[in-house]
Amino acid sequence: MENKIPFRVLMGPGPSDVHPRVLRAMSTPLLGHLDPAFLTIMNETMDLLRYVFQTENKLTVAMSGTGSAGMETVFVNLVERGDKVIIGVNGLFGTRMVDVAKRCGAEVIEVHAEWGSIIDCTAVEEALKQHGDVKLVAVVHAETSTGVRQPLEQLSELVHMYGALFVCDMVTSLGGIPTNIDEYNIDAAYSGTQKCLSAPPSLSPVTFSERALHVMATRKTPVQSWYLDLSMIQSYWGEERFYHHTAPISSIYALNEALQMIKEETLEAVISRHTYFGKELQRGLENLGLSLLVEEGYRLPQLTSVCIPDKVDDVVFRKRLLEKYGIEIGGGLDSLKGKIWRIGLMGYNAKQTNVALILAAFKDVLTEQGITCK
Ligand SMILES: *Cc1c(COP(=O)(O)O)cnc(C)c1O
């Protein structure tokens, strides 16, 4: 296998590079999934997830599946047919939430903003006023398709004033910017392992507040997905240890190790590292004469979207970056296709050497493409 894998630096929108310690953890011998030693690892993983999410929520587990499985978990467990749901759509993942919620039978009210901008509180308030009796409001905290950081505090207050649940997509925010579940009063959130947690894709950490638990406990209909039904997942991860499905053992080793590393560095230091190197990269790109898509103040440090200069061919540029430097970055999606590149500095990758590498590589390949960099 090893000779089939070329050297790469994964600086796109995910997956991001995995720390060698996490890779080693994955090659540790398997335990049975009901082995008491594995139970200890699951318990420890839940505690570490609470630390990184910043929550006391009892129901904090890792769903088997990627980030999208977490998204689906939130909607299938909280929404019943006919429920009104407001979703902020300012990028690809808001669009995906709409699709998932509709498949759950929700009556979806979309609040749109331009791709690259935040969802406006006033627009959400208007939707809440106009529709009444809204079950939940969902937004994407870190829109990986645009690089926008959605402010949550004011929105959370507003949503609760109208008696709805507040749901956040935290796939790219967890471990990169503060998620502060308890402080911001977030009722349900889901994440993924391959963005800022620096583990391979395969698990989706989720957390649910007491209020969300109450909503689930008082459902009129059973959750339509057997695999993602939290009432059963809870008794698998909980004391009862009822067999539900076989946990992906090696992936849980990896997540446990990745979270352990965040704890050792401290969450605060991890977040400042992202902030620092994200700014360094953004300043460096602007110094090359490039402009950034997102307005200052709403930029994610872990995902930077930079506008492609007029004369440069998107695909040729990225191919050259990959072949000459082994660097992977992302292109734009949908309406931003061919207009932006997306550069990730996630988890293990948020470091000086990567900032220096990508800026040098950008300057070189842009020059090849006939752009004079400053
Ligand atoms: C990556 C991502 C997802 C989907 O996660 P997968 O692991 O690809 O299923 C959802 N939301 C956001 C914001 C993401 O960045």
Image (cartoon, rainbow, N blue to C red):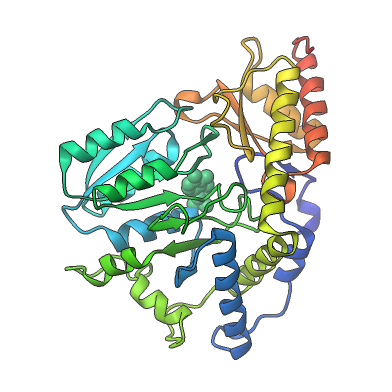
Give the residue at x 72% y 52%: 269
Name the image quarter holding residue 29: bottom right
In the figure, 312 relative to 9: above or below?
above
Give the residue at x 57% y 32%: 299
In the figure, 256 relative to 92: above or below?
below
In front: 145, or 294?
294
Give the residue at x 78% y 13%: 373
Q: Along the horizontal axis of the image, is 132 left or right of 212? A: left
In the figure, 107 relative to 366: above or below?
below
Could you tell me residue 235's position as x and y percent? 40, 81
Could you tell me residue 163's position as x and y percent? 24, 52
In front: 262, or 234?
262
The image shows a total of numbered marks equal to 0
In front: 215, or 195?
215
Name the image quarter holding residue 98: top left
Check the picture and name the quadrant holding the N terminus: bottom right
Give the residue at x 50% y 31%: 333
Name the image quarter holding residue 323: top right
Could you tell me residue 218's position as x and y percent? 21, 70
Could you tell me residue 172's position as x and y percent? 55, 47
Check the picture and name the quadrant holding the C terminus: top right
